[in-house]
Image: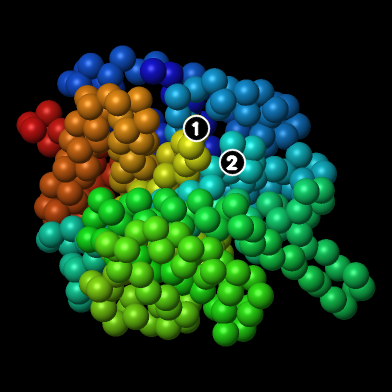
């Protein structure tokens, strides 16, 4: 089983290296028979090839069973015309990674910032919406008709809405059987009303699952007040991006937030947080988010290829993360602990081996 490894920028190579150490342990423990292909993206690729996303990377991603994507500093890239493509966005578009699954779950011993335990999943549509790099067939979805006016195009399609809602209901069927569709249809009366019509269509096929709707601003307030009533939240791209960061930070820290970008064919494990250039090279980055994302990738591979040992490996990583993070003495500095990247990874590996 071959995985493509794209280390990314800033802390990306550091947390990717830690993730590969963990994978080596579960590979041996559960006989996964993993192999790796490495490729350069981001600033390293820009310097070598004149682009942050060489065309060969797409081919490598299609040929791999899954992709491990480190954080990228795309905000600092040059314009697209000068080679500054966002590798994350390019993979999502080119591989049609329509579902961005972002769980938020509090850990015993690490108090949730909202004071109430959190256990929910956000199913975020990943290929359209207000994101300017994926709302048009040709050219960006943002433009300036005059020097004093900027316009953005929002794209909401039936196909994308139906399939992300289907994903959400399938997730809920495995969990507490509740889906909340988040929208702003009181203002975006055409596009978000259309999204809700698609959500209701899918909901009708799942009568055993509770379905409700919430305005996005109300949803943000409700997550802060008490996130416990929510199970699976489904929404469009930008709302999902914002609410998932809020939910994971409320649950404990975005530094722990796992994330999987998936289609019916491809999947990319990607930390939910950014590249943190301010701490790059200091050996203090928390690798939990990318490690947890890789656990999600292993579970996706387990389900796609009927490989129970991959599911067991995913569970071992997730349980190891919970145990390691729940103990103050084995937390990273961003969580109030004392450990750096290497020491935390060693502690996590010890927990996995003890299982």
What residue is pinned by disc 1? 265
Give how far across and how far down residue 326 sits, in percent: 14, 54
Which residue occupies the foreground of this view, 70 or 160?
160
Give how far across and how far down residue 6 sits, in percent: 51, 31
Circle 1 packing at 10 Å, graded few (<14), some (14-19), many (20+), is few
Disc 1 element:
loop
Give how far across and how far down residue 294 sits, in percent: 35, 37
Q: Residue at x 62, y 83 (%)?
A: 187
Specify whether 248 is left or right of 73.
Answer: left
Dot placed on the residue nearer the N-terminal end, 2 or 1: 2
Label of residue 96 in the image:
2
Which residue is at the far right? 146
Mark 2 and mark 1 residues within 8 Å of each other at the beta carbon: yes
Give how far across and how far down residue 126 sits, in percent: 55, 52
Q: Residue at x 23, y 72 (%)?
A: 228
Specify whether 25 is left or right of 39.
Answer: left
Q: Which corner quadrant of the image does residue 252 belong to?
A: bottom left
Which residue occupies the foreground of this view, 87 or 131?
131
Q: Which corner quadrant of the image does residue 299 belong to?
A: top left
Circle 2 packing at 10 Å, graded few (<14), some (14-19), many (20+), is some
Q: Residue at x 48, y 77 (%)?
A: 216
Disc 2 element:
loop
Q: Report if residue 16 is visible in the image.
A: yes
Q: Residue at x 12, y 36 (%)?
A: 351
Q: Report if residue 70 is visible in the image.
A: no
Which residue occupies the foreground of this view, 97 or 257?
97
């Amino acid at each position: 089983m071959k995985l493509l490894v794209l280390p990314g920028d800033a802390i990306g190579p550091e947390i990717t290296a830690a993730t590969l150490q963990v994978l080596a342990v579960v590979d041996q423990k559960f006989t996964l028979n993993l192999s790796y292909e490495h490729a350069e993206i981001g600033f390293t690729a820009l310097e070598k090839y004149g682009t942050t996303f060489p065309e060969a990377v797409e081919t490598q991603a299609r040929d791999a069973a899954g992709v491990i994507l480190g954080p990228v500093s795309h905000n600092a890239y040059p314009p697209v015309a000068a080679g500054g493509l966002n590798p994350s966005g390019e993979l999502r578009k080119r591989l049609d990674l329509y579902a961005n699954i972002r769980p938020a779950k509090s850990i015993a011993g690490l108090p949730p910032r909202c004071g109430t335990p959190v256990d929910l999943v956000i199913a975020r549509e990943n290929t359209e919406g207000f994101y300017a790099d994926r709302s048009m067939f040709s050219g960006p979805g943002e433009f300036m008709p005059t020097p004093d006016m900027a316009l953005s195009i929002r794209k909401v399609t039936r196909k994308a809405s139906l399939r992300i809602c289907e994903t959400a209901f399938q997730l809920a069927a495995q969990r507490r059987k509740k889906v909340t569709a988040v929208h702003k249809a009181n203002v975006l009366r055409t596009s978000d009303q259309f999204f809700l019509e698609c959500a209701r269509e899918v909901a009708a096929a799942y009568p055993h699952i509770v379905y409700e709707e919430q305005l996005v601003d109300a949803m943000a307030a409700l997550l802060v007040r008490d996130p416990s009533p929510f199970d699976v939240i489904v929404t469009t791209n930008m709302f999902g991006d914002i609410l998932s960061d809020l939910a994971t930070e409320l649950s404990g820290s975005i530094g722990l937030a796992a994330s999987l970008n998936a289609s019916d064919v491809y999947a990319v494990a990607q930390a939910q947080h950014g590249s943190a250039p301010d701490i790059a090279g200091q050996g203090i980055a928390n690798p939990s988010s990318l490690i947890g994302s890789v656990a999600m990738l292993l579970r996706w591979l387990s389900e796609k290829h009927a490989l129970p040992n991959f599911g067991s490996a995913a569970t071992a990583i997730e349980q190891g993360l919970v145990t390691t993070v729940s103990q103050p003495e084995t937390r990273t500095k961003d969580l109030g602990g004392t450990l750096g990247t290497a020491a935390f990874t060693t502690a996590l590996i010890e927990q996995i081996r003890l299982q």
